[in-house]
Structure formats: C-alpha cells, structure tokens
Amino acid sequence: VKKAASDDELSIDCVHMDQPGPGHTHPRGEIDLCFAVSGEPTFDGNPAGWTVYPPGSWHVPTVAGGAMDILYFLPGGAIRFEPEPA
C-alpha cells in the first residue's frame, strides 16, 4: 500500500532522462538534483546540480546534450501533468 504524502512531506522520484518529458505544474514547487551521466547535459538549460521551481510553475522538463539522472523532490507529492495553463 502506497501512502500519500502529507503537506509536510516530500515525495522523491528518480528518473533517467535524455529527451523532453511531459509538461507539468508544480502546485507546491519542485526541487531537482541533476547528475550528468553522459555528454555535457543540461536540464532546462541548467548544468548538473540543483534546480528549484517555485509553487505554481509549469514546464516541460528537458535534458539536452547528453543524459542525466535526476532526483525530483516534490513537497506534499504535489504534481499535475497537464498542458501549459493559459
């Protein structure tokens, strides 16, 4: 049984990326720790390391120039996969 994260918890996911992922909104923000795996990759134009998105932000997560392993920290586990809000 998977327990849903409460407001004061973080869900943590790990992904391997070498191309764009699905667009999504961060209702409570998102903190990413990006590790270069091959090439000289960037995540949304940023080098390996930390990337932080504020609450309410939306993006298409994009790795270019190689591959990365990324840890996604989501406050309260909140994420909405959706088209860019108008």
Image (tube, rainbow, N blue to C red):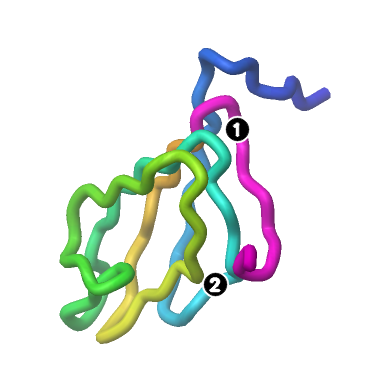
- Whichever of callouts 1 and 2 sits on the residue coming sooner in the sequence is 2
Q: Specify the quadrant that holds the C terminus.
A: bottom right
Q: Is residue 15 above or below residue 61?
A: above
Is residue 82 within the magenta segment? Answer: yes
In this picture, which residue range is highlighted in magenta? 75-86
Q: Residue at x 44, y 37 (%)?
A: 73
The residue that disc 2 covers is 21
User: Element under label 2?
Assistant: loop
Q: Residue at x 58, y 26 (%)?
A: 76
How much space separates mark 1 and mark 2, taking CA atoms?
Answer: 18 Å
Looking at the image, residue 51 sits to the left or right of residue 7; the answer is left
Percent x, y for residue 61? 45, 68
Residue type, mark 1 in image: Gly
Q: Residue at x 70, y 63 (%)?
A: 82
Looking at the image, residue 68 sits to the left or right of residue 10; the answer is left
Residue type, mark 2 in image: Gly
Percent x, y for residue 52? 30, 46
The residue that disc 1 covers is 77
Is residue 17 within the magenta segment? Answer: no
Q: Residue 63 lies in what quarter of the image?
A: bottom left
User: Element under label 1?
Assistant: loop
